[in-house]
Amino acid sequence: MKTVNIGLIGLGTVGTGLVKALNANGPILKKRLGIDLNLLLIAEKNWRKARDVKIPLSLRASGARALIADPRIDIVVELIGGCGDARSYIVEALKRGKHVVTANKALLAAHGEGIFEQARRGGLDLYYEASVCGAIPIIKTIREGLASNRISSIFGIVNGTCNYILSRMTESGMEFAEALGEAQRLGYAEANPALDIEGDDSAHKLAILATLASGLWIPLRAIYTEGITHVSLMDIRYAREFDRVIKLLAIFKRQGNAVEARVHPTLIPARHLLASVSGAHNAVCVNGHPAGEIVLYGSGAGQDPTASAVLSDIIDIALNIRRGCAGRISPVARGGRAAIKQIDEIETQYYLRFSVIDRPGVLAGITGILGRLQIGIASVIQTERGGTVPVVIMTHRALERNVRKALARIDRLPFVKAKTTLIRVEENL
């Protein structure tokens, strides 16, 4: 029976989950695969930390670099995160001819181009299923299951924290701050939730998905990123008036030789499958030809789902090693860079909420500016009267550049009392 030796760097939440999964399922996998997945060494800085898994002294490496240098190791699993040590460990492992599994979305989004090229030159496998959406096999689906397809679009709910917050606001009428506090108490949000609620985590994941789907490198800096902190309960309720819900979406679209890659709150039809994704779950809708629409749904984070994804990558690489076909699939992109549309260049519909003094001529002043910039109005809601009131307008498709120009002018009008809220709309997902 073939033995494949694994070296694990990092024994945090996911690393501990991986050890548990190997202990629990190792005997079954040995029978199923005909391969012994042998966890040979673990590198961890803090062995004093209490864990709910026992690690024999024989598995404890003297350090990450010693683990990587060990000639017995076939696969190096990096689970420490960040872009410092993790990057150097992965590069060193590849230079030494080791295959690599990582869950490090931030590293791949920021520095993946060079790392993937290193793996390609060495004919090595670099797998990263756990970097996007936990247990949902979205990477393998696009890379292999949809290899025959030209991917035209991806719409993803890829951050469980934001989806939990927006779900609670929608279902229970909570304001943003209250829903965030609940998410933190339940462990769905960090004490400092900025990476999630500002959209950066979703942007890291979109950079990976868009690169994989397009076959061209999508730089993280080119992705327009906007979080959910400006979404209010009022917007949630008005969205319902339009038979829509608000979700933080990671969006990829291919249009000829150009692509769109953006992350922002989005109004979507209440009838769409993504609208029903609640709590901390993730879901990704992929549209390709000839497959059509495919939706994947499941647990996007946490110890067990993420460990499951890491282990699935280990299994794939182990099978490749046994068959002597490592590097049979390009790690991510075929090379080159995509022409990425700037946010000002996109065309979509818009939800606009104005805060204005209730007096004659206000609506005419707003619509006049919109009209002069070729922004058509699909519907208007104004139900409150007296004092400062909200006026909500749903536009037809318009050029973002024109919408921004219009709002800059409107927000300077004397009867407008707060910055206008803009949320983009996707009607045909």
Image (cartoon, grey):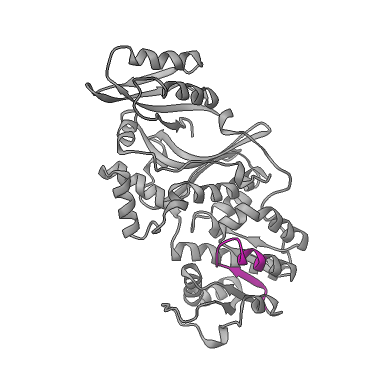
Residue 417 falls in image quadrant = top left
Residue at point 61%, 83% (across, down): 62
Residue 278 screen position, x and y as percent: 36, 47
- Considering depth in this image, is 111 or 289 the residue closer to the camera? 111
Residue 392 falls in image quadrant = top left
User: With 76 as the anchor, is 353 left or right in this view?
Assistant: left
| Residue 3, magenta (yes or no) | no
The mark tally for this picture is 0
Q: In this view of the protein, can residue 194 be seen by the observer?
A: yes
Please say if 64 is above or below 103. below
Q: In this view of the protein, can residue 35 be seen by the observer?
A: no
Residue lying furthest right in this view?
A: 121
Residue 371 screen position, x and y as percent: 46, 14
User: With 214 as the anchor, is 366 left or right in this view?
Assistant: left
Please say if 30 is above or below 117. below
Residue at point 63%, 51% (across, down): 143
Please say if 154 is above or below 41. above
Residue at point 66%, 31% (across, down): 256
| Residue 75, magenta (yes or no) | yes
Which quadrant does the N terminus fall into?
bottom right
Residue lying furthest left in this view?
A: 386
Q: Which residues are magenta?
A: 73-90
Residue 364 screen position, x and y as percent: 37, 12
Residue 13 screen position, x and y as percent: 46, 69
Please say if 188 is above or below 290. below
Residue 154 falls in image quadrant = top right
